[in-house]
Amino acid sequence: MISFFLLTSMVVITMETNPAPKGHLKPLGSHRPSDGHIEILTTVPRPVEFWEKYVSKGEPVLFRGAANISPGLKLWTDEYLLENYGKFKVKIESKLEKDNSPIGAFGIGQDSLQNFIRRYKEDDVYIVSQLPDPMGKDVVVPRCLLCGTIRTRLSEANLWFSSGGTKSLLHRDSDDAINCLYNGTKDWIMIHPKDEGNIPIAKEVLEAYGGFSIIDPERVDLLKHPQFVDVPWKYVNVKAGDCLFIPRGYWHLVTSGGNKNLAVSLLFGRIDNFEPHNCDSTNVDAKMHLTEVGMVWTYDGFGIQTMGNNSPFELNETIHEMCIENLQSRITVEYIMEFLMEVVFLLSLKNIL
C-alpha cells in the first residue's frame, strides 16, 4: 500500500513538473508568437531586382494589389466561367488534403469546369489543376517574370478553386512560384528552410525537393515532436488582388477563406544563375497576358495534364551531372534510358503507395 502511494505521488509530481509545452494539441503556430508578417511591396519589382533581392536569396515577398490588372479578377464570375470555359477538364481533390479523390464528370479526380461550378458550394470538392491555356488570356503576368532566365524557365500555370474552408498540410514545393489570388483570402504560415531540421518530414519513395510534414496542423503533438517547439514562423495575409512569391523549399501551410476562393499560380524552374537576356529590349511595364508569354508545359483543356512534371531544363542538368560523375567512363544511350526507366518505375510506385 505504501509502495502504491509513493508510486502514485511520483507520477503526480512528474506530471506537475513536466507540463505539456505551449501549443500542445493546438493549431500550428500556437507554439510560439510569430516573427511578424513577411515583406510587403506595393510595386512589383523589375526582373533583375526580383532575382537579386528575393529569388536568389530564397526570400518570400507579397506584392499587394499586383493581380488587380488581370482581367480575370473581375471577369471570373461563376456565370462567366460557365459560359466561356465550362467545357474544359480539370483535376479535382477533396478539400481534406491526402484524402480520397472525388468523382467528377470525367471519372475519379477529373471533372468539367461547368460541373464543378454547379456543385462546389455544396460538395467536398476542390480544383487543383493545370490552367487550361485559353484561360491565360485573362491572366496578366507580373512584370518581374517578363525577361531573362526566369521567363525562359516558366514551367506551368495552375488553377486553385474552392468554396473556401480548405487547409493544406505543412509542406514545401520543388519550384519557385507566384500565387495570385482572384477571390477570397489566404492566410499563410511560412517557415524558413534553415529550420526544417526540427520539422518531422514524411518519408517518400523518391528523394524530392518537395514534401510534406507528418504534423497534424490542427492538433500539433509537441510531446511526440518536441523539437518543433523551437521552430520560428512568419505569417502572410493575402486578399483578392495580391500576389505572393513562395521560394522553392520554403515550408508553408495555407488556409483559404471566403465563399469562393480562386487563385492562379505561376511556377518557374529552379534557377541557380540569372541571365538578363532581352531585359534591355523588353518593355516589362506593358501588360503581357499569359497566352503571350508561353510556358514550358501547356494544357489545351482536354488532353493529358503535365501538372507536376519536372522541367526539361532540370532533366538536362541531371544528365549533365551524370556526365560529370562518370568522366572516366562512357555514358551510352542505354545507360540513360535505364536511369530514366528506373525513375519512372519509382514514380509509379510512389503514386500507388
Image (cartoon, grey):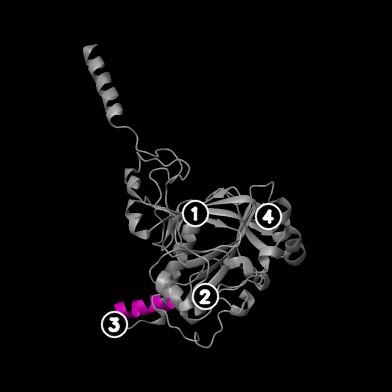
Labels 1 and 3 touching (C-beta < 8 A)? no
Q: Which residue is mark 4?
A: 104
Badge 1, how many Cα within 10 Å: few under 14, some, many 20+?
many
Residue projecting furthest to the top? 1
Circle nearer the N terminus (2, 3):
2
Magenta range is: 314-327
- Give amino acid for label 2: Leu
Whether 307 is among the magenta residues is: no
Say if residue 338 shows up in the picture.
Answer: no
Q: Which residue is mark 1?
A: 188
Labels 4 and 2 touching (C-beta < 8 A)? no
Would residue 132 appear left or right of 82 to someone viewing this image?
A: left
What residue do we see at 24% from left, 23% from top? 10
Residue 295: assigned label: none
Q: Which residue is mark 3?
A: 327
* Distance of label 3 from label 4 (alpha carbons): 51 Å
Question: Of 268 and 246, which appears nearest the observer?
Answer: 246
Question: Of 206 and 275, which appears nearest the observer?
Answer: 275
- Give amino acid for label 3: Leu
* Distance of label 1 from label 3 (alpha carbons): 45 Å
Q: Which residue is mark 2?
A: 145
- 110 in relation to 142, above or below: above
Badge 4, how many Cα within 10 Å: few under 14, some, many 20+?
many
User: Toward which corner of the image does residue 315 lie, by quadrant?
Assistant: bottom left
Circle nearer the N terminus (1, 3):
1
Q: Secondary structure at mark 4?
A: strand
Badge 3, how many Cα within 10 Å: few under 14, some, many 20+?
few
What residue do we see at 39% from left, 43% from top? 31
Q: Please identify, in this view, whether the residue under mark 4 or under mark 1 is nearer the observer.
A: 1
